[in-house]
Amino acid sequence: MQKVLLVEDHAMMLDGLIAVFSLDDRIEVVGTAQSLESFDEVAESTDATLIIADFQLKDGVGTEIPRRLAAIDRDIPVLLMSGVASERLLDLAIDAGCCGYVPKSMRCNDLIEAVVAVADGGSVFPHEAVAHRSEGNDRLGLTDRESEVLALLAQALNAGQIAVELDVSLATIRNHIRSILTKLGARSQLEAVLTAFKLRLADPPLR
């Protein structure tokens, strides 16, 4: 089950999100915060497996949350929400280390599926923000096969699914993933994917 901490400073939006997530037994809202200050008060003790944060808060921006989590040695994915979908916010979310961002105009069912996708190690970004991004030219020494594997990781496929997709052994895919992590200087598959998005080596999955 995905345990969610909501960081949202508008009471009506907060109540709406709680109501939406209550419709799905795969998601449980375990806490709320209405500012960065109140988030700091619960950050160390929360048992959340995902934080959903509004971009514009009354005392700062939601992209600040990954840095604050890192400062207290907490590794919790952060999904950003915003009233608009733009390439600028896409870049800000990726640079901050968020696992994705979703516009507030997203349909309720799509939002639920986005949260579940993140629980499975995926990332979510809106189609509108991705549409005009260009592919990266510097591939950092990745081979054609490694680039292919990285692109599939970026689409939230796991190693087993990639092995089936490319018709190779699971061991081969794991070797490719290790090589990708080394070349991108990443400590995890999620970090490698976020780095790929930032450098435009791969496109985020469309939502």
Image (cartoon, helix red, strand yellow):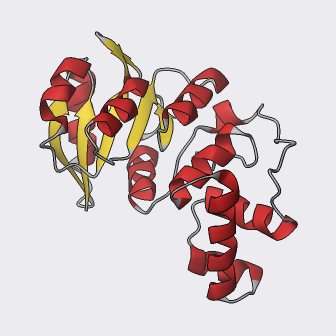
Q: Residue 96 location, x and y as percent?
A: 49, 32
Question: Residue 76, position in %: x, y?
Answer: 32, 47
Left or right for 97, reference 159: left
Query: Is 29 displayed left or right of 125 in the figure?
Result: left
Q: Nearer the viewer, residue 197 or 185?
A: 185
Residue 77: percent from the left, percent from the top? 38, 46
Instruction: Identify the residue at horizontal 28%, vertical 45% (top origin).
Output: 74
Instruction: Tell me if residue 35 can be seen.
Output: no
Near-viewer residue (174 or 164): 174
Res 69 → quadrant: top left
State whether residue 131 appears in this view: yes
Q: 106 above or below 64?
A: below
Q: Quadrant of residue 111?
A: top left
Point 19% across, 27% down: residue: 40
Where 166 sits versus 25, above or below? Answer: below
Q: At 20% across and 21% down in the image, what residue appears?
A: 34
Q: Give the image quarter of residue 198.
A: top right
Number of marks drawn: 0
Split into 4 quadrants, where in the image is the C terminus? Answer: top right
Farthest-out residue, bottom: 169
Q: Is residue 192 left or right of residue 75?
A: right
Which quadrant is home to the N terminus? bottom left
Residue drawn where x is 70% and y is 57% of the image: 183
State the residue in front, 207 or 135.
135
The relative height of residue 154 versus residue 82 in the rendered view (above or below) is below
Residue 68 in picture, x, y percent from top left: 31, 30
